[in-house]
């Protein structure tokens, strides 16, 4: 009996799918080309979840810079290359300003916060975050001093290795995460704090889950989220525990809040909540606070720490680049503490950081966008509500924009006079209305961490440099560098861990 019911159910679903397909026949003819989807499962059989990025790039070669795929029954348009991504995200920035489906975030954070929200909620949360980051972070001397202090702590921790090989992942993550923790809730954590270590464990777990085949499966079938079990539930657990960490910080802030003297992002949000408590339509409530702070914490930790780790590996692989950066540091900074204003006088160092971001390509798929209205792109109709993935890897590795894109070559960002030149296709933070709100903060962090470390150390390894593999360990929603061990040799000839004690 159950088998008969199951077969009947499948037949009915197929008939519904066919009817919907016929009902949208006109739209289907105007859509960008793509592989033929199957009922219910779409193109899942043609896209290995653990090789998603590779599959999409194969489709690019077959169908061109714009094509359509189906994740289950969900239509998704893929954009490849700088030109078409610019046409969509910049030239038609409002039409492509929606956020596409993000199953894990929507399941745990329920559509609140900055990253996965849309409409008026997204506009208000983003505007508030930008204002607060500007007041407590970006462009402020206080946050620059905080980064400088954290970089010095990282130097001290590196020095404790006494020239022996070590994996920098943990120490770099601690240092970087402490910056966004300072902005979000005014705290600095010791690197052995158990709650802090648990936070970093969960952040790392989230990024690895998002890069797994399991995550791709969830994107195909969002409706199974409430029924997750076993490994599939692990991703939701990581994000839920991160949210619980933020909940605790919010409770602490509520107990010690002084409305006349806000200390950090959470304080500012709590004050705004109080100001709008009589507004029944306000977006300033506890759910948006916790979700927004969680968004900042995750994004402000993982992307920068991954870029730093990738950058250190690249500098070890290419010691001649490292020497040139150190020469510029010696000439411009000397033994003084590196500062943000040094950036304008150090074009080669800035070019190296730009090339690290381009080469590392840590968010290759970009985050999903969504059309807010019916729109045409290169004569193709993209209906309202269609998910759109701008594949950032096809911009950062676009040979028309960056000749020999698989070669690490910082000089591509320098003009004939050795001055830094801007490149419109350098989009590690994406572009358009959904560009990363923490871009300027991230650039400051990268500059201060790299210059402080290279001022004090020469980076090396016991492994033959030709054996250092720069291809990512994971390659799907994000690129993570392969695990490696490095050695740091103090440039002043003494072990900093001893001289600082």
Image (cartoon, rainbow, N blue to C red):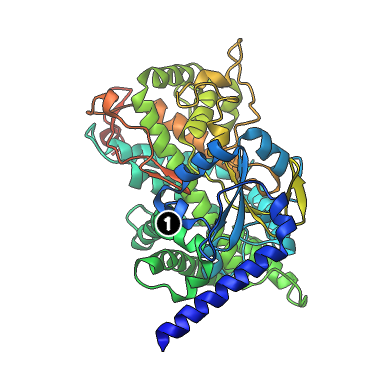
The residue lying toward the viewer, choosing from 449 and 332, is 449
Q: Secondary structure at mark 1?
A: helix
Residue identifier under label 1: 203
Vertical comparison of 437 with 351: above or below: below
Estimate the x, y position of residue 84 in percent, counting from the top left. Answer: 67, 37
The number of discs equals 1
The residue lying toward the viewer, choosing from 30 and 356, is 30
Which residue sits at x=44%, y=76%?
A: 227
Vertical comparison of 254 with 87: above or below: below
The residue lying toward the viewer, choosing from 162 and 120, is 120
| Quadrant the C terminus occupies | top left
Residue count near mark 1 (Cα–Cα under 10 Å), binned few <14, some 14–19, many ≥20: many
Which residue sits at x=34%, y=39%?
A: 156
Q: Is residue 128 visible?
A: yes
The residue lying toward the viewer, choosing from 452 and 237, is 237
Q: Residue furthest bottom?
A: 1
| Quadrant the N terminus occupies | bottom left
Q: Is residue 252 visible?
A: no
Q: Residue furthest top?
A: 417
Estimate the x, y position of residue 94 in percent, counting from the top left. Answer: 76, 50
Which residue sits at x=56%, y=53%?
A: 36
Estimate the x, y position of residue 60 in percent, counting from the top left. Answer: 55, 39
Q: Is residue 470 left or right of residue 245?
A: left
Q: Quadrant of residue 209?
A: bottom left
Estimate the x, y position of residue 5 in percent, counting from the top left. Answer: 47, 84
Q: Is residue 165 left or right of residue 394?
A: left
Vertical comparison of 404 with 245: above or below: above
Which residue sits at x=46%, y=29%?
A: 451
């Amino acid at each position: 009996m159950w088998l008969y019911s199951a077969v009947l159910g499948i037949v009915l679903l197929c008939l519904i799918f066919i009817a919907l397909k016929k009902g949208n026949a006109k739209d289907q003819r105007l859509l960008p080309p793509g592989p033929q989807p199957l009922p219910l499962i779409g193109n899942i059989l043609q896209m290995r979840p653990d090789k998603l990025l590779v599959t999409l790039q194969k489709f690019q070669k077959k169908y061109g810079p714009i094509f359509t795929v189906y994740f289950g029954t969900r239509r998704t348009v893929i954009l490849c290359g700088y030109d078409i991504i610019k046409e969509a995200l910049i030239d038609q920035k409002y039409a492509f300003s929606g956020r596409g489906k993000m199953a894990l975030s929507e399941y745990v954070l329920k559509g609140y916060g900055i990253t996965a929200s849309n409409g008026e909620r997204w506009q208000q949360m983003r505007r508030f975050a930008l204002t607060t980051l500007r007041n407590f972070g970006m462009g402020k001397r206080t946050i620059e001093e905080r980064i400088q202090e954290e970089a010095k702590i990282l130097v001290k921790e590196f020095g404790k290795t006494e020239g022996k090989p070590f994996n920098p992942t943990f120490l770099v993550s601690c240092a970087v995460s402490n910056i966004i923790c300072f902005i979000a809730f005014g705290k600095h954590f010791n690197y052995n704090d158990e709650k802090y270590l648990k936070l970093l464990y969960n952040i790392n777990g989230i990024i690895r889950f998002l890069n797994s085949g399991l995550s791709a499966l969830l994107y195909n079938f969002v409706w199974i989220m409430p029924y997750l079990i076993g490994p599939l539930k692990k991703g939701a657990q990581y994000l839920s525990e991160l949210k619980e960490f933020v909940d605790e910080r919010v409770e602490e802030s509520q107990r010690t809040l002084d409305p006349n003297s806000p200390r950090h992002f959470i304080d500012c949000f709590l004050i705004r909540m109080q100001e709008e408590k009589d507004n029944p339509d306000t977006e300033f409530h506890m759910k948006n606070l916790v979700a927004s702070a969680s968004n900042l914490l995750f994004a402000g930790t993982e992307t920068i720490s991954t870029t730093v780790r990738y950058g250190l590996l690249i500098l070890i692989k290419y010691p001649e680049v490292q020497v040139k950066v150190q020469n510029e540091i010696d000439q411009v900074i000397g033994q003084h503490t590196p500062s943000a204003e040094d950036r304008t006088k150090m074009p080669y160092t800035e070019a190296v950081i730009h090339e690290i971001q381009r080469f590392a390509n840590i968010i290759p798929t970009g985050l999903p966008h969504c059309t807010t209205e019916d729109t045409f792109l290169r004569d193709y109709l993209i209906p309202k509500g269609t998910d759109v993935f701008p594949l950032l890897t096809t911009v950062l590795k676009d040979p028309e924009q960056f000749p020999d894109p698989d070669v690490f070559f910082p000089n591509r960002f320098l003009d004939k006079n050795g001055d830094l030149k801007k490149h419109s296709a350098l989009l590690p933070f994406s572009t358009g209305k959904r560009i990363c709100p923490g871009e300027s903060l991230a650039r400051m962090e990268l500059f201060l961490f790299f210059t402080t470390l290279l001022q004090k150390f020469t980076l090396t390894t016991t492994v033959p440099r030709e054996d250092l593999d720069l291809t990512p360990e994971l390659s799907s929603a994000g690129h993570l560098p392969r695990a490696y061990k490095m050695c740091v040799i103090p440039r002043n000839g003494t072990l900093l861990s001893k001289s600082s004690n």
